[in-house]
Image: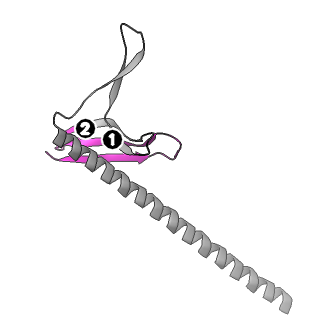
Amino acid sequence: MNISVKQMTLTNDNENFTRAFATLCIDEVFNIEGVTVKKSKEDKLYVQLPQKAYKDKETNEKKYKDACYPTTKEIRTELNNIVLETYYQKLEERENIKEDSQKKNKKTVKEKTKQEEIEQENEESR
């Protein structure tokens, strides 16, 4: 079975338990939307498959039930590993983009400062 992450979007809110949203693709013929990467109260990441809400008939409380789930422990482990690996790759990409942006900004500031120095020298020489 070939499981891949078709799409993943990172959240920007580190205070939120949800860290990313993903769509999985199984054997290039079946997609699962609504997969999330969440952070537990113990600061551990885990993968949550889509759930549907329902009301408990006895207590009338809102509860959640898995909408889909792996049938074996091995498939669950494989699925978790694939999703978390993609999550870490996306985090690394985002950090690299931030670093590149910061380097560009520093370079632009240096160029502006140099240009201002040249202009000031030109004004002084007049």
Q: Position of residue 59 (x, y in %)?
A: 40, 9
* Magenta-drawn segment: 1-30
| Residue 62 falls inside the magenta stretch | no
Q: Is residue 18 visible?
A: yes
Relative to 114, say whether 72 is above or below.
above
Inspect the magenta stretch and tell me whether residue 14 lies in it.
yes
Residue 98 screen position, x and y as percent: 51, 62
**Residue 21 versus residue 107: which sits nearer the camera?**
21
- Residue 124: give x, y in percent of width and height: 85, 89
Q: Is residue 96 above or below residue 66?
A: below
In the rendered structure, which amino acid carries the disc numbered 2? Asn
Q: What residue would you read off at disc 2?
A: 31
Q: Residues within 10 Å of mark 1 (few under 14, many from 20)?
A: many
Distance between the alpha carbons at the discs numbered 2 and 1: 16 Å
Identify residue for label 1: 47
Farthest residue to the bottom: give it. Answer: 125
Q: Is 102 positioned to the left or the right of 56 in the image?
A: right
Name, please, the residue furthest toward the top.
Answer: 58
